[in-house]
Image: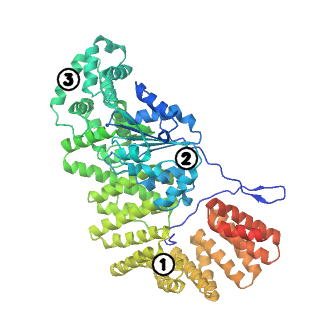
Amino acid sequence: MSHNEFIGGSAGTVIQVRDIHGNLVLPERALPVPRQLPAGVTRFTDRTVQIGQLDALLTTATSNSRLVLISGAAGVGKTALSIQWAHRVRDRYPEGQLYVNLYGYHHRPPMETEQVLDGFLRALDVEPEKIPSGLEAMMGMYRTILSDKRVLVVLDNAGSAEQVRPLLPPSEGSLAVVTSRSMLGGLVVHDGAARVALSPLAAEDAVTLFRSVIGPEMETDPQAATALVNQAGCLPLTVLITAEQAATRRYLDLAELVQELRVEGNRLDAFTTTDQDTEVRNVFSWSYRKLTAEVARTFRLIGLHAGPEITVEATAAMCGMPIPAARRALVTLANVNMLEEVARDRYRFHDLIREYAIERANAEEPEDERRAAVHRELTWYLFTADAVDRLLAPQRRHVPLDEPGPEINPLTFVSYEAALNWCEAERPNLLAAIEQAANTGASDIAWKLPVALIMFFHLRKHRMNRLSTTLTALDAARRVADRYGEAWSLICVGGAYADLRRFDEAADHYEQAQAICREIGDRQGEGMSLVNVSYALQNSGRDAEAIEYAERALPVWREINDRRNEVITLNVLADASIGLNRMTEALSYYEQALPVAHDVDPENEGVSLHGLGKIYQRLGNVAEATDFYERALGLRREIGDREGQALTLRALGDVLLDTGDIEAGREALREALAIFESLEDPAAEEVRRDLTEL
């Protein structure tokens, strides 16, 4: 990682188990059992034939039984059937159920395969720092974990066969269930999928579903009930909305409701979706026209929200309303089936209803109000992300912001973990917000929001999100010729490439940033660029060049009194000097860094202490080396730097072995091995070999 951008670490506990001879035993880590299936549908009618087809697939001996495709039009109940049946058969797959909405047919871009695999691997308890970068590597890990497991994978709302194939479980004992509006013939022809086609409900089944909501009163006019469900297209989604309206308007009989729906539909333009007739849209309009003015406005504006889900707080920002009013509006919309509540204070649209909300916004909201609503929400995301950044990395340079305005109330966080959890929950919305900012001309937000999220992406190891968003930031800054934003974005892109260990590309972007910072007089940016180039060169084995760049950065930090970055640069200079076997110079750099680091940066204080131990070890001063290593180890344990602990334990073990204290040295190496193993660090093999030789 770029030392100039990040501080912090994650705490962990090493549990040791020993055999009767006292040797450390490293048991295999049992995988957790993911249970990701959403809750089943409370009102699920008929589909007896399709459930029978699905059940029959599990009893066949063909390869078809490991891949099932449920296809059908929007709103026909594909997701409901897939989830209902998945719960029915989940006990056959005791090692877990995975679920994802791929957004193949949605206003937002489809889910990227890397993002889905990242989520699945985390659900399978792969620690974020162990998740590899690159699609092939992620697929390899996913397939390896599931190679001998019996799991159920539900891939909802797929747009293409290509989107599905990398996510299929490899074991013949597993099952994948795919839903799609498309027929996905490629999955059938090339992958052996068994297709179950889903059509609208038969009229009598639609009436049964209608009755489950409205109750026995409808029996007084079965013909009118049939007419209503037919006007709803016999789609489960729209039948439920129709029934909800009928149930809440008991002063009208069903025949009057049939006529009202028909008349209201005549006042509307043609429905915008391509796979439903106009009567479905009429059902939406019927519910919409019964909303109060405030709730209807909320419905229109949140249709402009770019992400897959929306929270009460984001709604309040977008609509410029107090949070209690936003919560009441969302609850009302959920009560009439125009929104679905997926978690506390978190909601989502059905795709068709979102299309209708967008249509209403375009028809009834002036363009300037639509733009203002989107800008309010994007601004809220930016200021909340900045609050996260200031908590996660208080000493880091933060994006420049004006006052948010009276209608924007960004969130604040009481703890480090709360801030990270909010970012994780909102990650799909944050990614969508960055793209929306770039696409709507909000270039200032489009470059600042990714910069504010860098620490989160780094800590949770969302490497590809980090790269894609910083590239968006760079493009946005360049589009409006914001040289300050361009330079900062270049530094962030460089950090993303460095995190992917693409050091040549990292160095190139840092060099570009340095030139711009010198041009515009941004001394801090210039220093950041220089030390980051140095870091990239050092990691590429070019220590002499690394020293040249770091020496140019050092006076910048002293000029502007940036003590933290001065420490980082001194440590980089010392590391590069060791690489060139210049021990006296390295010792001087570490000794300069240590007292400053003690005051401002415990992570880099640990780096300095460990580095001093390494120098004294090479100089043959065992007592001094041991003392510095032990101090470094204590500090790294205190701040939860597990990788640092392992590095220091390994070095301390070597020193103890050199002094003849074999047992203490072996114990230190065993502890280092346990941590390296838990981090899946390649150094584990080297330490294991050293222990074997002992």
- Looking at the picture, does residue 532 appear above or below residue 348? below
**Mark drawn on residue 485:** none
Of 404 and 273, nearer the camera is 273
Of all residues, the one furthest to the front in this rendering is: 62
Figure coloring: rainbow
Front position in the image: 255 or 47: 47
> Within 10 angstroms of label 2, few (less than 14), some, or many (20 or more) residues?
some
Three-letter amino acid code of the residue under disc 1: Val
Q: Residue at x 40, y 43 (%)?
A: 188
Residue kind at label 2, given as amino acid type: Ser
Visible in this render: residue 356?
yes
Cβ atoms under marks 1 and 2 closer than 8 Å = no
Asked if residue 422 can be seen in this view, the reply is no
The secondary structure type at the circle numbered 2 is: loop
Marks 1/3: CA–CA distance: 71 Å
Residue visible at 64% across and 87% down? 583
Residue 291 to residue 323: above or below? above
Residue 73 locus on image (x, y percent):
31, 36
Residue to which mark 3 is pinned: 260
Residue 171 horizontal/vertical position (percent): 55, 46
Disc 3 residue type?
A: Glu
Of circles 1 and 2, the one toward us is: 2
SS for dot 1: helix
- Residue where numbered disc 1 is placed: 531
Q: Upstream in the sequence, badge 1 or badge 2?
A: 2
Give the x, y percent position of residue 63.
49, 42
Q: Which residue is label 2 attached to?
A: 171
Outermost residue on the right side: it is 21
